[in-house]
């Protein structure tokens, strides 16, 4: 019996040494935004029709740690680039609502992801962070659909911005009534790579 136990112990030891090592902690990833594939589209409803427009990307780079779900970095849009296809309306938007000459940037600084992000394929998660517009930061949590490929990433998000509640002027006039919030559809995409070792 003692000999059999010793033999089993020897086999177990061999199997333990031969077994693969546990996977290393997932490496931090760098997500860079491609200006040609990244934009923030906005939709504002009024009593007569729906106004649609967009803002152009200024810069964007995020660092995501899959192990802790922490995110650093920011995505910055050029507030002065906002356009809806109507010069008079856009002039009013920049002068009276956004005051884009004074506040030329709109940004999102995520700090964490709530939910599991798959190493490959599509995941639906909640992204928490600070949304900065008109010179003030606002805490938000946004549902995001994100997709990771080998060296590319993309993400889409839809969320409202209650601009009137956040201290911006409602541009309604006597014959035109618009809502107090604007819907944002964000699409971002670009290169995906492991962070460089320190």
Image: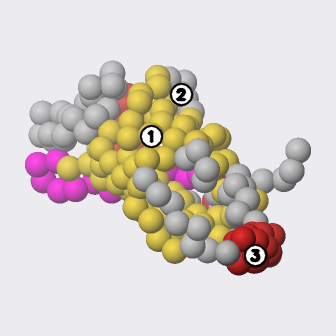
- From the viewer's perspective, is residue 53 above or below residue 104? below
Q: CA distance from mark 3 to mark 1?
A: 60 Å
Q: Which residues are magenta?
A: 46-61
Which residue is the site of mark 1? 128
Placement of the N terminus among the 4 image quadrants? bottom right
Which residue is rendered at x = 52% and y = 66% of the image? 118
Which residue is rendered at x = 17% and y = 47% of the image? 46
In the image shown, does 65 or 73 lie closer to the viewer? 65
Which residue is the site of mark 2? 103
Percent x, y for residue 113? 49, 47
In terms of image quadrants, where is residue 98?
Answer: top left
Classify mark 2: residues with Cα within 10 Å, few (<14), some (14-19) or many (20+). Answer: some
Percent x, y for residue 123? 44, 65
Q: Is residue 196 magenta?
A: no
> Marks 1 and 3: in contact by CB < 8 Å?
no
Which residue is the site of mark 3? 3
Q: CA distance from mark 2 to mark 3?
A: 81 Å
Percent x, y for residue 54? 44, 54
SS for dot 3: helix
């Amino acid at each position: 019996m003692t000999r059999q136990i010793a033999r089993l112990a020897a086999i177990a030891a061999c199997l333990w040494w031969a077994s693969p090592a546990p996977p290393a902690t997932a490496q931090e990833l760098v997500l860079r935004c491609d200006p040609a594939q990244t934009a923030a589209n906005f939709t504002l409803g009024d009593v007569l029709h729906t106004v649609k427009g967009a803002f152009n990307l200024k810069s964007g780079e995020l660092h995501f740690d899959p192990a802790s779900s922490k995110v650093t970095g920011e995505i910055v849009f050029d507030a002065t680039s906002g356009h809806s296809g109507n010069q008079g309306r856009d002039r009013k938007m920049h002068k009276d609502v956004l005051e884009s000459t004074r506040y030329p940037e709109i940004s999102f600084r995520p700090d964490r992801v709530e939910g599991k992000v798959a190493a490959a394929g599509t995941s639906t998660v909640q992204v928490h962070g600070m949304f900065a517009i008109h010179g003030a930061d606002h805490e938000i949590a946004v549902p995001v659909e994100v997709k990771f490929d080998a060296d590319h990433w993309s993400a889409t998000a839809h969320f409202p911005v209650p601009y009137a509640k956040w201290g911006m002027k409602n541009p309604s006039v006597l014959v035109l009534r618009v809502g107090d919030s604007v819907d944002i559809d964000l699409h971002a995409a670009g290169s995906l790579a492991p962070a460089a070792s320190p």
